Structures are given as structure tokens and as C-alpha cells.
Amino acid sequence: MKLHCLEGERTQKLKLKIKEIRGRFLRAFIPVMLLETG
């Protein structure tokens, strides 16, 4: 039971990390896209 709880917590942290990395990537990428198109 405790193991399952830990697994869920790990998944949650991983999702947060992925979201953070994706957000950072998008913030870096969008200006480049705008420069390319504009």
C-alpha cells in the first residue's frame, strides 16, 4: 500500500518536471518561431 503511494508521488513529480521543461522549451522556442515567420 505504501509502495503504491510512493509510486504515485514519483509519477506526479515526473509530470511536474516534464511540464516545467516543456514550458521552458516553449518560452525559448516561441520567440525563434516569431523571428522565423516575421
Image (cartoon, rainbow, N blue to C red):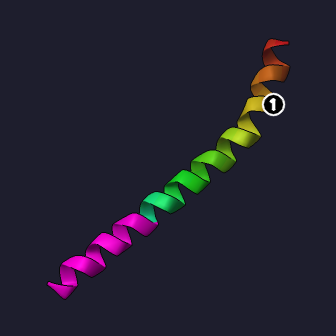
Where 21 falls versus 7 (above or below)?
above
Where 8 falls versus 36 (above or below)?
below
Task: Write down the quadrant of residue 9 in the picture.
Answer: bottom left
Please, what secondary structure does the residue beneath circle 1 have?
helix
Residue drawn at (20%, 87%) of the image? 2
Task: Give the farthest residue toward the bottom.
Answer: 2
- Assess disc 1: are there few (<14), some (14-19) or many (≥20) residues with their C-alpha within 10 Å of its C-alpha: few
Is residue 27 shown left or right of residue 14?
right
Magenta region: which residues? 1-13
Q: Quadrant of the N terminus?
A: bottom left
Give percent across and percent down for residue 19. 53, 52
Give percent across and percent down for residue 11. 35, 66
Where 1 falls versus 25 (above or below)?
below
Task: Give the camera-side residue of 15 and 28.
Answer: 15
Q: Tag 1: residue type? A: Pro
* The magenta stretch spans residue 9: yes
Give percent across and percent down for residue 16. 50, 60
Residue drawn at (66%, 45%) of the image? 25
Residue drawn at (19%, 77%) of the image? 4
* The magenta stretch spans residue 34: no
Is residue 32 shown left or right of residue 3?
right
Task: Write down the quadrant of residue 26 in the picture.
Answer: top right
Task: Give the camera-side residue of 30 and 36.
Answer: 30
Q: Quadrant of the C terminus?
A: top right
Kindly report the secondary structure that dominates the magenta region of the rendered protein. Answer: helix
Q: Which residue is mark 1?
A: 31
Residue drawn at (60%, 54%) of the image? 21
